[in-house]
Amino acid sequence: MNLSIEYEREEDGRWIAEVPELPGVLAYGTTLDDVMAKAEALTLRVLAERLQHGESRPEPLSISIAAA
C-alpha cells in the first residue's frame, strides 16, 4: 500500500494536508510541521481502525510526501 500526503498553503495562511488514497483524511494546521504531524497521526488512526475491523489486510506500507 502506497500512501502520499499532499499539502499546500491556503490564502489565509493555514496549511492543509490530505491523503488522497484514504478518503476523509484531511487536516489543517498553522505550520507545515503542525499539519504534517496531524495528517500522519490521522492516517495511522484510519489504518489502525481498518485493520481492527478487518477492512484492510496487512501489506507493505510506504508513505511519501508531495507538495500540491
Image (tube, rainbow, N blue to C red):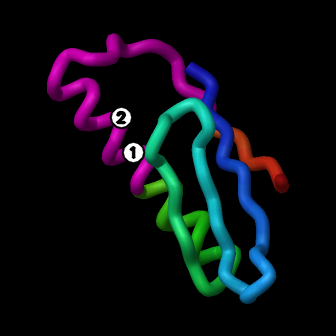
Q: Decide: marks 2, 1 in contact (CB < 8 A)?
A: yes
**Image point 62% across, 37% down: which residue?**
20
Q: Residue at the front extreme?
A: 11
Query: What is the spatial separation of the Cα atoms under label 2 and label 1, in whole angstroms?
Result: 5 Å
Q: Position of residue 41 (x, y in %)?
A: 42, 57
Instruction: Locate residue 24: give its quadrant.
Output: top left
In the picture, measured across the screen, residue 22 lies left or right of residue 53, that is right
SS at mark 2 in the image:
helix
> In the drawing, what numbered circle is on residue 47?
2
SS at mark 1 in the image:
helix
> In the drawing, what numbered circle is on residue 57?
none
Q: Residue at the right extreme?
A: 67
**Image point 64% across, 75% down: which residue?**
33
Instruction: Locate residue 14: give its quadrant.
Output: bottom right
- Going by the numbered disc 2, the residue's amino acid type is Leu
Q: Is residue 61 magenta?
A: yes
Residue underneath mark 1: 44
Q: Residue at the left extreme?
A: 53
User: From which residue to which does the magenta span run?
Assistant: 42-62
Q: Position of residue 64 (x, y in %)?
A: 71, 40
